[in-house]
Image (cartoon, grey):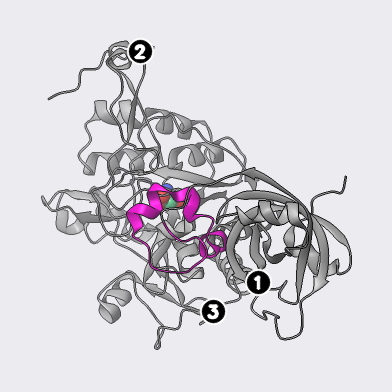
Amino acid sequence: MIKRIPIIETTEKTGQLVKLNGWVHSRRDHGKIIFIDLRDKSGLIQIVFLPENKEIYQLANALRPEWVISLEGKVQNRPKGMENPKIPTGKIEVAVEKLEILNQAKTPPFEISEEKEINEEVRLKYRYLDLRRERMKNNLILRHKVVKFIRDFMNDKGFLEIETPILTKATPEGARDYIVPSRIYPGKFYALPQSPQQYKQLLMVAGLEKYFQIARCFRDEDTRGDRQPEFTQLDIEMSFITQDDILNLIEELYIEIAEKVAHKKVLQKPFPKFTYKEAMEKFSDDKFDLRKEKDPDVLAFAWVVDFPLFEKTETKELTSSHHPFTAPKDGDLHLLKSNNPKDLLKIRSWQHDLVCNGYEVGGGSIRITNPKIQSRIFEILGHSKEEIHRKFGHLLTAFEYGVPPHGGIATGIDRLLSILADEPNIREIMAFPKTGDGRDLMMSAPNEVSPAQLKELRIKAAK
Ligand code: ASP
């Protein structure tokens, strides 16, 4: 028996017998000759069935798009004038000598082989078919390459990839938490992490110095634009560093990703840096696009720093511009003593945001490591002493045991990829995204659970 090879390798096998497996991509009949394009993960190739070979020809006659087949045949040059310069195997074809139908397929709800506009709800319901399409496959390949590049890069810089829990306690990043009821402790709940923020800071207390993770984050937000309830960040934390060390690391990584992996041009190197005030004066926005022509092959990165530590919520209370672990700038520390919101709003912080082509693609900060300053910030944010202890006691206690100065950043992998792939939204670069309003149409989630399950959890759904 011969060993199956990927379709792309047939380009080096002219004159040889090969075995191929895959899906019928399309079928064309020319007179008596049946042509199909066979597709596997590596590409497409033309397959020819001649009427002379009766048994196989009859079997081939039944073939329909998306049937799964296995075949053996000879790789041969296509007749002159029949070449297809658009595909790598365009000069050759395979004349079949053995054919096996592995599985039949229903007619798909949309054409896999054509790049047409397809209703997105249908695409998401049949995502496994949508992902068969060239565009989606290429996006997943790009995603893999970028993540692999990040892992290698971070490893070379001496970072450890460490996993942090998904079932955990709330970590505020400005959104609502997804919560999971505990069966063993009725009435108690885990929260899914809005980010690994507290864990990564605790890893610094643990002395690991350089942490990173390709981290899944969960945020229950009202449907606002192009957001997903769960998304992926490159999450980083480092000890004994300055803000510039963090910015330089990301800058080096992102330039390499843009140029080496995605073959794009970076508009300005080093990335220009604006204070929040400058950005607001110049662009009236802290997410801006520095490109004159909106060329998708050009990436215009920029840093924004010196954000205000606090901002006002709609109900006029103070909230963190970033999150409550971000350190105030040393020169503004004296203002922390004030109870006047006017003074507090003047405090600048060590927050840094990365923007690219009009999107915020990352953010982070130097952290508070002084338990007194941290408690004061929680107090300003309106937490009572009891609440501070209950919600963040573990962090404050940890900081009493020798905490190194530290800081970090998290950058959005999905957003970066949508920019690199020039896709209009982040759903296009995720394998299994949810709709804009948070539904998984393929799995039908969210969904009711059985009364028995609710009973076990001692939960009653309110009507
Ligand atoms: N945890 C922050 C976020 O998700 C990032 C950071 O401060 O490192 O935005």
Q: Mark 2 CB in 8 Å range of ligand 1?
A: no
Contact between marks 1 and 3 (CB within 8 A): the answer is no
**Residue bounds of the magenta highlight:** 110-138
**Residue at left offset 45%, top offset 83%:** 295
The stretch drawn in magenta includes residue 120: yes
Q: Which mark is residue 115?
A: none
The image quarter containing residue 192 is: top left
Whether pointer 2 and pointer 3 mark residues with C-beta atoms closer than 8 Å, the reply is: no
Q: Earlier in the sequence, mark 2 or mark 1?
A: 2
Marks 2 and 1, how far apart at CA: 50 Å
Q: Give coordinates of residue 205: x percent, y percent.
A: 54, 37
Q: Which of the two labelled residues, at mark 2 and mark 3, occupies the earlier sequence position?
A: 2
Residue drawn at (48%, 63%) of the image:
416
Q: Earlier in the sequence, mark 1 or mark 3?
A: 1
Give me the disc on residue 266.
Answer: 3
Question: Extreme bottom residue here?
Answer: 292
Per the image, the residue denoted by label 2 is: 185
Please state which amino acid type lies under the numbered disc 1: Lys
Q: 215 above or below 321? A: above
